[in-house]
Image: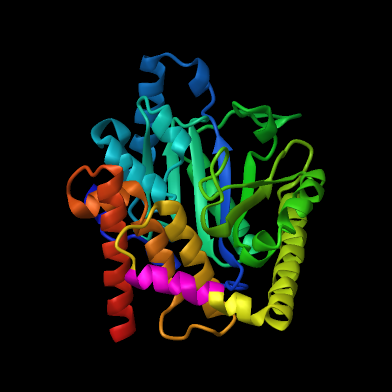
Amino acid sequence: MSFQSFIDQAISPWMQSGGPQDDIVLSTRIRLARNLSHYPFPLKAPAEMMKKVNDAITASLSGQSIGHYENLQYLSLDDISSLDTHALVEKHLISPYLVEHAHHSGVLLSTNEQLSIMINEEDHLRMQLYFPGLQLEKALEEAFQVDDEVEACLSFAFHEKYGYLTTCPTNVGTGLRASVMVHLPALSMTNKLSKMIPAINQLGLVVRGIYGEGTEALGNIYQVSNQVTLGRTERDIIDNLQSVIIKLIDHERAVRKMLMKNSALELEDRIYRSYGVLKHSRLIESKEAAKCISDVRLGIDVGYITDISKTILSELMVLTQPAFLQQYAKSHLNQHERDQKRSAMIRERLTLEIED
C-alpha cells in the first residue's frame, strides 16, 4: 500500500459501520504509551538515538500483522509533505504532536486503519486502536492483544513498582489513555455542558476538542478521556470512563427530548437553516461548516432529516478540513479559495447522496 491509499477516502474503513450508542458516541479509542528499554526517551534523545529507535521498531513490525490487523504499513514523516501529514491528522491517524515534533518519526498503519502505531511521538511508541460507537471493553481486549504481540518483539521500559515508564508522569503505570468521541449538540446549545465539565474533571477525566489536547470542539464534538493512570488498573480506568459516558448520553438524550417538546419549531428551524446553508452556500468557513454538519446530524438523529446518512456527514467533517481540501484540489489554496472549495465539495457530496 502507498501513502495515497490512506487519504483516498476521508473516513477509515472501520468507520463505515455504526456502533453501540452511535447517536451520541462517534468512536472509542484506546491508546497505549510505551518506551523501549535501554534507550533515552524522545524528549532527551539525540538524533542518532531517535533513528535507532525508529529502525528497531520498523524492523520488528513493518509489513507484519498484529492480531487480525494485517500488513502494517510504515510511513516516515521525513518523507511526507507538511500538507500530507496534516491530512493524516485530520483523519486521526496521527497526532498533532507527532507532526510538530517530527524527527526520525513515523507511523505504522493497519490496512483498515483501525490500528495506528506512532513512532517517536512523546514516547517511543503510541499504539492506538479505534472502534465505532461505545466499545471500551472490546477496545481494551484488542489493545491487550496488540500490546502482548508487540512486547514479544520489543523490550519495553518497565518498573516493578511504577509500571510502564513514560515521558509524561500522568501516563506512568498502565500507559493507558482511553477516550470516547461524543457529539453533544443539545448540551452545548443549552450551555449545560460547560456546567458539567468541572464535575467530570473531579472524576479524573478531561474533556478536550476534536483533535485532543489544546484543540477546539468543532461541530460540538468532544473527546472525553482519563487524565492519569498511575495507581489504577486498566479496568478501573475504562469502568470510570464508561460510567461517565453513559451519564453524558442520558443527559444529551434528555435535553434533546426537552428541546423537541418545548422548542420544537426553533430546533427544526435551526436544523433546516443549517441544512440549507450546506446545500446552497457558495462560501463557507470550516467552523461554520462543522456547526452546520452538527445541526444536520442532530436532525437525522431526531428524525427531521431522512434523505441523507450520518456517514456522509462524518466524511464531510474530514473532507472539509484544510489539508484534505487541498489534497483534493491538488494545489495549495488560500483561505478564500478553501472556503469556496469547501462549499462546492459539500454541495456535490450532498447532491450525490440525495440522488442515490
Helix, strand or loop for the magenta stretch, by majority: helix
Left or right position of 119 against 255: left
Locate residue 118, reporting x and y percent.
44, 39
Quarter in which the C terminus is drawn: bottom left
Q: Which residues are magenta?
A: 270-280
Q: In terms of image quadrants, where is residue 289? A: bottom left
**Residue at the image position 45 percent from the left and 57 percent from the top:** 288
Q: In terms of image quadrants, where is residue 201? A: top right
Residue 57, magenta (yes or no): no
**For this rendering, which residue is in front, 128 or 226?**
226
Left or right position of 313 against 76: right
Locate residue 211, reporting x and y percent.
51, 46
Q: In terms of image quadrants, where is residue 229? A: top right
Asked if residue 6 shows in the view, the reply is no
Residue 272, magenta (yes or no): yes
**For this rendering, which residue is in front, 112 or 323?**
323
Relative vertical location of residue 252 with respect to residue 283 in this rendering, above or below: below
**Residue at the image position 18 percent from the left and 45 percent from the top:** 331
Asked if residue 22 shows in the view, the reply is yes
Scheme of image coloration: rainbow
Relative vertical location of residue 153 with respect to residue 73 in this rendering, above or below: above
Number of marks in picture: 0
Left or right position of 35 against 111: right
Relative vertical location of residue 307 with respect to residue 106 in this rendering, above or below: below
Farthest left residue in view: 330
Locate residue 315, reporting x and y percent.
38, 64
Locate residue 120, reporting x and y percent.
44, 30
